Structure formats: C-alpha cells, structure tokens
Amino acid sequence: MPLRLLKYALSKDYPGTRFFKAHETPKKSYDVVIIGGGGHGLAAAYYLAKEHGITNVAVLEKGYIGGGNTGRNTTIVRSNYLTPEGVKFYDASVKIYEGLSEELDLNLFYSTRGHFTLAHTESAMRTMRWRAEVNKHVGVESYVVGPDEISKACPQLDMSCSGQAPILGALYHAPGSVARHDGVAWGYARGADQLGVEIFQNTEVLGIDVKAGKVVGVNTNKGYIATSKVLSAVAGFTPRICEMVDLDTPIVIHPLQACVTEPMKPWLDTILVSGSLHVYVSQSSRGELVMGSSLDPYEVHSTRSTLDFVEGLTSHMLDMFPFLSNIKVVRQWAGMADMTPDFAPIMGKTPIEGFYLDAGWGTWGFKATPISGKTMAETIARDHAPDLIHSFRLSRFEDYELTGEKGAASVGH
Amino acid sequence: MKLLTCPVNGTRPLSEFVFGGEYRVAPPADCTDAEWAAYVHNRSGAPGIKNEWWYHAPSGTWFIAERNTLTDKVMRTYLKGQEGSK
Amino acid sequence: MSARLAKQKGEWINRSTAVKFSFEGKEFSGFEGDSITSALWASGEQVIGRSFKYHRPRGILSFANHDVNIMLTDGMDTNIRGDVVPVRNGMALEAVNTDGGVKKDKNRFIDSISPLLPVGFYYKAFHTPRKLFPFWENIIRKAAGLGVVNFNYPRILKRKKHRHCDVLVIGAGASGLSAAYEAGKSGLRVMLVDENLQIGGSLGFDWGGTQEAANLLKDLLAKVESLPNVEVIAAAYAAGYYPDHLIPVVTADGMIKVRANAVIMASGAFEQPPVFRNNDIPGVMLGSAAQRLLHRYSVKPFSNGVVFTANDYGYRVAQDLLEAGIKVAAVVDLRSDAKDGPLAAQLARRGVKTISGSCIYEVQPNAGKTGVKSVTVAEYDEKLNEALTRSKVTIDCDGVAMCAGWAPAANLLYQAGTAMRYDYGVHQFVPNKLPAGIFAAGRVNGVYALEQKVQDGARAASLALRHIGLGTPELSSVSPSNTAQSHEYPVVPHPKGKNFVDFDEDIQVKDFINAAKEGFDNIELMKRFTTVGMGPSQGKHSNMNAIRILARVRGVPVEQIGTTTSRPFFHPTPIGHLGGRGFHPHRLTPLHDMNHKLGAVFTDVGAWKRAAYYQVPGLSLADTVLAEVEAVRTKAGIIDSSSFGKIEVHGPDAALFLERFFTGSYSVQPVGSSRYTMLLDESGVVIDDGLAHRLADDLFYLSSGTSNAAAVYREMQRWQQMWQLDIGLVNVTGSYAAINIAGPLARQVLSGLVNVSLDESAMPAQSICEAEIAGVPVRLIRVVFVSDTTYELHIPTPQAAFVWERVMGAGHALGLKPFGTDAQRLLRLEMGHAMPGIDTDGLTNPYEIGADHALSLDKPDFIGKRSLQIIAKRPLKKILVAFALDAGYAGEMPFECNLVIRDGEIEGRVTSIAYSRTVGRVIGFAYVAPDHSALESRFQIRADSGALVSATVVSSHFIAMQK
Ligand SMILES: Cc1cc2nc3c(=O)[nH]c(=O)nc-3n(C[C@H](O)[C@H](O)[C@H](O)COP(=O)(O)OP(=O)(O)OC[C@H]3O[C@@H](n4cnc5c(N)ncnc54)[C@H](O)[C@@H]3O)c2cc1C
C-alpha cells in the first residue's frame, strides 16, 4: 500500500483540504473570463496561469464543475485520427495525458489499454489503412491488424459477430487509453485554484457585452463582470453563447448517449470500437462495461435518454459478445454534443475581438482537454492561435477548407 | 418526442423517420461569396422553435415539422407548400 | 437451526414441494416459492455475501429487490440476486467476489486496513512514480468487479411485445390497486404492473399485528379482478420512463413496451436505513425486510431483536414480530417523545420497553462477525445529532429491525421531468409539479395511512381519466401525512466509523464529511467523489441519507441540496432483454440464388449482398479475379448489377429537374441516349455519379451506384418538394434486376436473344432502347463502365432469373463467365473510371477529380454550383491522377491508401491500385499536388515497409496502354 495513504490512517484530523476554494461573489473585473467549468475551461485557466502568468482569471460555471460533457463521456483517449493536422493535435494531447496524473498530483487512472477499431467491410478496411498510414507518418503507433491479432487481444470476441458482420481486421492503436473524467476536471480545477484562478460554481453567464466589435464584459446571475477577454468553453451550450455575440457557426447539438453494466470481474482489457455495428466498449477499473454508440439522429438540446439507443446498442453488443445476455445494464445517460460538419473542433479567435471560441468538441473532446487548454491559453495570452490549431479555425468554413475527420470520429469517440 | 405525425400517414414511431435538418432558404445566387459560404455551412444552432425537414421513410414523404429543439415538442407538421392549412 | 415459522395465511411458499440446493458447497433445502435469500435465511445462513470494497460479511438489508450485497453465481450465471431470484432444485450457488468462499473470504483483511482507504483514495495514490501505476492498476482491477462472467453463457434473446393502454398504473399496493380499479371502472384499457411476484405491495407484509391490511388487499384485489379491462401483471417492473409515455415493462421472459395515454406512479417508497456503527452486520435489517421475511416466506428474521425506529412504522414492525412469536428486546426510538405515545403503550402492554430519545450507538457482532451479539443504546441529542455516550446500555439480541424512514420510489417520476419539493411535514421529497399525463399516488406522494392511500389512488385515477378526456369529476386532493414518516437526520456519529450509508459501495459517514472538506460539497460532486448511489442498487437505500448528511455539513435545508438525476433503469436490466434480435437489414438481389449456385462469395455493399467473385476450386483469390477480368477482356463476362439505384423521372419538367439536380445538361439530350450524371451537395462536394437514360422527351431513367441509391432518391424527393416541378419520381430499384454482359463477344452472346439489332450503328455506346428477350420486355443500355462493349439489361424482377439463365445458356459456348465486384473494380480501373466513395472522400470537389467536363457551369443553377464558383477561385490543393508503376516493376506492391510522399511530407494518397494483366502494369489513381499532375510527372508512393515506389502520371485510359 503506498505510503501516501498512511497520513489518512495516522492523522487525527482529516488531512484533505479543499480542491478549490468556495468563491461566491466574483470581483468587478478580471483579465480573462472563462465561461464553462468543464475540463476544457478549467485546463485553459490552468495553463493561462501556469504558462503565461495570467492569474486574474475567473472560471464561471453555471452548474458544478465537470457536470457537462466532461462528466458524461466514455473517456476514450486516442490519437489515431485521419488528417495529419488532427493526428498531430490529438497526439500532443495524449503526450500531456501520459504525465498529467503526476503533474496535477491526482491519479486520473490514465490507463493505456490499446484500442481496436474493428473493420467488418472492405471499405472500412480501406479507411483503417488510410488512418494507419497517416498516423505512422506523424509518428503515432497505429497499424492494421488481422483477425488473429484481434482474437489474441480479445479472445472473447465472436469474430463472426454472430454471423452478421464478420470482422476482417482492425486498426490497432497501442496508446488508446481511458481515464477518470471527473478527475481531469478536478485536477485542473485544483491546479488553477492553487495558481490564483477563481472558480465560481452556480454562476451562469447570461449575456456578453460587446461594444464596437470588442468584448467589454459579461452579465451573470451574480452581476456584471468587466473583462476584455472571454473564452467560451461550453461544448453543448456553444450555440447559446454564440447567439449572445451574434456569431454564426456550423455547430448543431445532438445528444450522445452511453450506458454501463453492473460491475463484473475485469475480462475486457482493450477498448473496442465497431463502426459497422455502431458500438464501442471498454471495461472500467470498477468492472463495469462502459458502452456507447453513434450520435442521436436529430437535434435536441436535452440530455434525455431513449430506449431505442439501449436496444440498438445491446443488440450489437450481443453480436460481439453473445455471452452477455444476462449481464445487466445499470444506467444510461446522455450529453449534448456540439457537432461540426467535418467532425473537427472549432478553436481560436473569432471576428469579435476578445471573444475566443473552444467548441465543436462533439463526441470526441475529452481526449483533447489538455491540449485544447494549452493552445487556447496561448491563443488568449498572445491573441494569436498557434499553428497546431490553425486547421480548426472558425474561418475554415468560409474558406472552404474543412478538416475532414468524419472517417475517424463518427463512432469511435 | 418518440412519436411523430406525418401529414399523410399519421402518427408513427420515430424510427420510421429520417431527420433532414432545418428548413432554410438559400440566398439569391448573386449574394457574396461570404454570404453563400455562411448559408452552406452555418446553422442556427441555438435552441428554439424551428421548421425542419422530416422524411417518412416507408412512404417516401418529406414534410416540415415545427419543433421546439429544447423541449423536443412538435407544434405541427405540414407538407411543404401547404403551410397555411392545418 | 430452522427459522421457519408454522404455516400462515398468505405465505408465498408451497410447503408441499421441497427444493434442494447447495450454497458454498453445503446442502440446503427450501420450498418452492422461496427466494434464494429466504431459503438460506430459513436455514440459519446469515452470511450470504461480502461487501464490494471492505469484504465485510453481509446478510439481508432491504429484501426489496435491491439487496445487492447478496449476489451469487450458479456456475452458469453471475450476479444472481438472492432476494429476487426464486430458488430452484439443484442450484449450486456461491457468493460472488470472495477469495476462498463467503465464510473465509481472504480479502476480509481489507476491512481492517480501511483507514488506509480514505474517500477517493484511488485519486490520491498509485500515480507516482508513473512507472508503477500499471502495477497498482492491475491489483485494483483484480479487486474490482463482482461476479465472474461465463464466456459460454448462451445467447438468449427475450421476446419484445408492444402494448398500448389508456392508463398504466405502476405499483400494485393499496394506492395502485385503488387507482387501477377507479380507472378501470371507466371501461378503458388499464394495465397494472408490479415488480413483486404477488400483487399487494406493502398490504402483503406490513400488517402491524392486525388483519386490516390483509383484508383490504383481499377486497381491492377482488374489485380489480372483477374488471376484465384491467390487466394485472405481477413480477414485472417498469424499467424506465421515456418520452411520450413509453415505458418498458420487464418480466422474466421479455419486455413489454407499453405506451400509455396516462401513467399513474404508485410506486411506493424505499425504506432507508438509519446510520450507526456496524449497521451492516448480518441480522441488522430494515423493518420492512423483517416483515417481508415473516409474511411472505414465514421466516424469522431473528429470534430476539431490537427495533430501532424513528417513526411510527417501527411499532407496526414490532407488533408483527411479536405476532410471529419473536422476542422484541426493546424498541429504541430516536424521537424523544415516543415513549409517552399510544403506540409505545400498546407495546408496553405486550411487555416491550420503548427507549425514546435514544439511538443504537453500535452493534456488537458475535465472535465470527457473522451475526449480532448485542447492541449499545445511548441517548441521542437531536440538536447536535450525536449519541450521548455517558449513558450507554447494552442489550443482548440477535438482530435489529431498522425503521428510520423512507425515500419515495420516484425514479420514473424524475425521469419524466417531475419537479419535486421537500415536504417538512412528512419529511420526504414529494412531487410538486407533474408533467402532463403523469400522476402520482400513495407513499411516493407522501401519503401513508391505509385509507388515505386508497383515496389517493382514486384521486390520481380521476385525474388520469380527465387527462384522457373523460368528464370524470376531480376528487379532492389528499395531503401528505402531517406526521413525519422519516427522520430528518437518522445518523449516529461514531469515532470508529463503520456506520454505513451506502452498502453497495461501503461508504461511511466520515467519507461524506471528508469529501465535503475536500470541496465536494455539492450533491453531484459528492456522488462522484464518494461514488454514493453508483452501485447496482443505484442509491435506493443511500441517496436520501447522503443528501441529509450533506445538508447538515453545509448547514442548509435539505431541499437546497436537491437530488441527483435519476436515469433508467429502475432495476439493472439484462442485455438479452434489451437487445432482442440484432437488426441487420441485408438486401438480396433477385439473382442471389443464381449467384450462389455459381459459387459466388458475397460482400456487403451498402445494405446489399453482392457477389465479390465466383470461387473456382484450386484457384487463389487473386487468380480468380484475374481470370474473371480476362474473360471480360478476351471473351465475355456477366455481372449481376441489380443493386444499382434505378429511378424514373417523368413529366414535362423531367429534363429541367435533372438540370437542376445534376451538374450536366440534359435538356438537349436525345431520346435513346445516356449521359453521365454527377451529384454534388450544396457545398460542392461530390456525392454520387451515375447515368441518365432518356427514354422519351418526358421520361428519364436514372441508374446510379449501389451504396448511395436510397439517399440520392430521398434527396431528389426533397428538392422536388422545394422546386415543385411538374414531374413524378418513382424509385424502381426493386422492380428491375440488372445484368451487364461485357466483352468483345458480348454482342454475339446477346444478338440471338434480343429482338433488336445490336449493330454499332443501331446501338452505339451510350444508347438505350426497349427490347425483348424471349418475350420478356427489357431495357437495353450500351454502357462503357467495364469495357467498351457492354450491354446492360434491366429486367422486370420476376423474370430476372429466367433471363439470366437464357443469357448464360447463350453464352456458354462463347466462354461467358460471371464476374463479381472485385473484378469489376479492376475492370473499371483499366477503363479509367474513378469511383465516388473509393477515389473520393467526404470533402472532394469535382475539380479535384478532374471532372470539370461534367460541369455545365453555364446552366442557370444546379446544386452546388454557387459553391463551385467560390472553390474555383481558390488554388487547388490536390488532384486525382491516373498513374502506372514502371513496366516490369517487381518490388513491394503498394496498397490503396498508401501515401504519396514528397520531401518527407504527405502530398496525397493512392485511392485505387491493382496489377492489370491486361495492361501488363500496376495501375491506379492517386491524389498528388497539382504541380505533379501533368502527364509523365513522377511521384513517390510510400509502401507499407516504408520503401518509396516511383509512379508515373499516365492517361487514365489505361486500356490504351495495352502491351
Ligand atoms: C456520452 C458521451 C461520450 C463521449 N465520449 C467521449 C470519448 O470517449 N472520448 C472523447 O474524447 N470525448 C468523448 N465525448 C465528448 C467529450 O465529453 C466532450 O467533448 C468534452 O467533455 C467537452 O468538454 P468541455 O469542457 O468543452 O465541455 P463540458 O464538460 O460540457 O463543459 C461545459 C460547461 O459549460 C457550462 N456552461 C454552459 N453554459 C454556461 C453559461 N452560460 N454560463 C456558465 N457556464 C456554462 C456547462 O454547465 C458545462 O459544465 C463524449 C461525450 C458524450 C456526451
């Protein structure tokens, strides 16, 4: 048992202290106001303070920190994307994640389990190969494997998928990982708080004050806050925030659902995704199977659950693992995914001076939390976006220069 | 919403329908490039009551649904071109 | 030692049929009708499970279908719930998650090192040094989980049924039965479901020493049964609430998807444990659990128990215990005024002492920690919420019944969007604002007295009927009980802890207090940090206490804390129930059987099964495909193309429709000819291509690739809705089969069969005519996709097989061979045709595939045109070129999707590549930089090994390169 736990056993008074202070009322003004206390907003605050010395920062969260998509996602971290720009970006995130528990001194259970994207059709095999080639080029460990290697990594998998969709091969991505989503939010919150950032829960931004094309402040349920720089990091609420500054974007909101089973002794070591069967699954360190599927087919600003979703998902899980018939699903839930047409995020500056956008994280943004925090912090501090996120700029749509990630992001978040 | 009413075929389970996105009118062809690019790519993503395309797949019927994207309640559905009639 | 009582009225067991089974290697017997837990308890077994984290011995807690500390395996199945699953003959059961058996579980040492495992300990350690994390993770993963999964468990798919009803009543206790009866009197279709094996809810076990409840049950049941329109389903739980009143009702053999016009939730309340040290020792159980054991199974919960109560309910439990001949050592009541009340007096008359204003401070376990030895009772300071330990007394007993209060079983109410409020009279959350069509009755509504529950059910029914549109008079409302049924704070601190709040997850009081110290002082954050309510019982016995504790810690009223969100499922629901049959929509062509007979190996193309190639014994796949290609190049080949999309556009505006929809021009297209069609989306991306055949001035016949056919037709219908042209659209994909006969001898194969001339002049490339084969009308088209001489026949589906056989017969002597999609891909490549989806991706514009010739930009408008005007102004970044590897190249073969590399950077990628025996070269398509696209340009492809392979840009009419 690690020695660090001894102090909890030995000390009379509980040695734990607040992760972040309980601020109630914001000051009159801040250098930077961050809307959204999800992983992204908190990470941006942390890096603003840590790497740019900007500490007069308020993070405003309308609910509780990590309560948005950060606390609802299925925590897959990977970098085996399709475009070189995407692969480089997510790879930078994976690299930070690998040392993040140590950096934040919080065990995020960053668990590298290996990630298989199963291919059941020739056309899926082509996409796998394409991704593998691009990944390799950028230096990311991904390659196409055959059925034997898949069976070896996951002997329980029915390779014929009950005769319905035989598995031809897979894209194997060794760095594929899962982590504790809450921990990521809490760790960044604690880190930011320790550096002087103020975090406000139950604090909702109701309007953004723009004068002559420049941000001058925000209106909140706790009063007006003057600031010249606002970062919107609100994922599923992005259209509402953008409406406050009259900014049009391609983002539409679709629910994304997931579910877990009751705990069982761990048997599934890898992360599996099947595009054809529209499912993905991993087993958590609690022993639950964490399962998800593709996006809900229509726009709703709601986190309601549907029966169709679990019925479809579990049918296909049974194709892959017929022996799960009597394993029970405990809980299902949903988040609001901020979708872009090319399945790539929208990051950086906007036509409104001082209004920075970190959005379009759809079904894939958890893995980007560290790197988006870092690059958005840099963008805000220098008022200039680093090259790493150039392909994700909002103006790419006007430029007809989309960053096509659909082939790598539609089911395997 | 779990049921949707096709103006031709009546109330059917949602699984029979395909969502076709918001009903939008293109700007005139002589608009600026930026206006056109905005039309093609941008969406009014904020929640509210919207007119949307829906397709009843078994019968091949496209129609418009007036739906609140926040509450997921459908106010009414009608065939394009028959918005006046209820 | 048997704990079974003498036979009593209403028991659920059938004493005439004994059931033999084993538990942890020891033989036991019970009766038919016993649950596993009741049979074991009756036989004196009290340690039936181990807790998840600390591996503490556990017995019965709630016995209310969520007793998740008792999970077993029978070798076949896992995580079997002892409290719900009936015991069966021959079962060989073991507890899950033990090392060495439930009695001697080696992991029980964890209980003694629990101080080392503070709340959220796994966040606090194991991550430094980084290298060691996998080691610790491995240990933690091994400790995690409950049962072991059996990989040989059969795939069992349960039945799904759909049902509509007017009123669905959930919960068949007093209020549910009453609601069902009142609603049923209207004659409407009413369904009443209850999760328990028998109807009656608490009427079946909560007797309080009298016959009142049992009589009421008999009466209500008779009333409900007298109505044929009321369907009563027992052993069926409502698993969740979904929009538009869709409620899946789960039974042992399947799922009934009920859609109701109105729903009445009469789902009752979950009894909540008071929290004190060792409240988890086997023998300490909820009062309602004791009553269930007594009245359903005739099993004694213990023989000499203490009732620890904070409400009047505890006195009913005490009466029931006494009636069953169980000794009640004392009633300990948290409320200071209790002992002077009439209930205490009644007990006093039966010799039971009430100790009021007091709590159980701790339970002393017996030597083996397998049961209760005694309890320590102390005064309780309701202001400070502390036990005053100066005045402790110890009472010997072998069990405790706990009655501290309730939490509404409001899960489905929450899911439906009900706003709840905390009622300070009854001390419980109750519905404040119900969504339309949802009603609540009984304890979930805060209504506790028998008569009032009946009234409340009737009232809810009247509202439900009014909601449906009946003119039923509205009954007056029943207000929640004005005496507290739950204690505000039934929590007894103890310096040594082990006062459990969440039994699934082994969470103690101090864990909450410490979590709050660390800043997790919001109910959702607290839930996530402590994991309260995250176990299989989903907080049914723990969430309410967690809220109460947090309210105290923060010094705010309970309603300010709020509740965590409720999500489906009400009870964990098996995957086999939810999944049912996987939905795999495969479409077979009308010639599927023909193909099959010829040895076709099928591949999925969109929803269709198409022949990939025709297996020839002894031939490798590559050689098979090359042989099929060779037949087409030297003689003739035949392919089933029935899956192609086929659409008719007819009417005066047909040509205009095509002009707007596709990029080309069609108004001047001669009748009898075919033209290329390309479809873009509004952003100028290539979506699909195909052919438009003009059959008459006002009739076009469109054919297009397989995968997109349905989506393209759908888009046509949508645009037609906007354009409102004078046309009709008919999707005839299923009405026609299609076959292609291709190759130099194709004309010869067909000429004897068709009733028209196939001469080059009569039937040139890109022409179409209506013809007949053996009396079957067909559409005959000259296409050039796979070879210069190709005839495509579109045949009415019923005659497809007949025509196929005729053609095969006619071709036999000429060497006609079937070919599949693999050969087709190579053939079209040799012909220089790029294919959307293979040679394009989701963002490709026509300029990038050199399709400028397909764009009639002088047309007034077509879909995507305005975007093309913008794209045309921007520099091209890549362009698709045809290439060949050097003649005689014998090095590593590149694959599709290998990258084109220039100066170490990605320039493009190969989209198609194959060795063509016809051409004698490796040929293909690739994206390269525009300055690499001129004929004869050389570029480099990086093969899998990393080797660079040189390629040369050539004319796409590869076939012309023939050696
Ligand atoms: C079911 C599901 C599964 C997923 N699986 C994965 C996965 O496996 N891998 C992966 O990489 N990604 C996954 N994602 C996506 C990922 O969860 C998100 O992209 C990511 O968490 C977004 O983080 P965020 O910090 O930007 O947003 P959030 O965590 O949503 O935080 C935004 C915050 O802004 C707050 N807010 C909104 N409006 C206001 C306002 N006006 N004022 C103040 N505060 C406001 C919200 O309350 C919220 O807390 C999944 C998503 C879902 C829903």
Image (cartoon, rainbow, N blue to C red):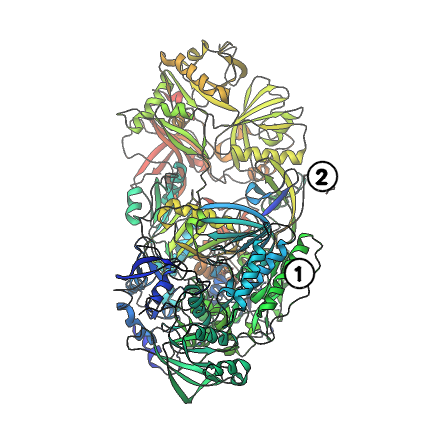
Give, as a three-letter code, the residue at label 2.
Answer: Gln
Q: Report the amino acid beneath label 1.
A: Ala
- The chain ID associated with circle 2 is B
Q: Is residue C955 above or below residue C464?
A: above
Q: Is residue C590 left or right of residue C142?
A: right
**C465 and C604: which one is in front?**
C465
Labels in figure, total? 2
Report which quarter residue C15 is drawn in.
bottom left
Q: Secondary structure at mark 1?
A: loop
Spatial separation of the CA atoms under disc 2 and disc 1: 43 Å
Q: Is residue A285 above or below residue A401?
A: below
**What residue would you read off at disc 1?**
A212
- Farthest residue to the right: give it: B84
Decide which of C839, C561 is in the foreground and name it. Answer: C561
Chain assignment, label 1:
A
Residue C299: x %, y % from top left = 39, 67
Asked if marks 2 and 1 touch (Cβ < 8 Å), the reply is no
Residue C292: percent from left, percent from top: 44, 66
Q: Is residue C757 visible?
A: yes
Image position of A7 with respect to C671: above or below: below
Q: Nearer the viewer, residue C257 or C582?
A: C257
Report if the beta carbon of the residue with label 2 is closer than 8 angstroms to ligand 1: no
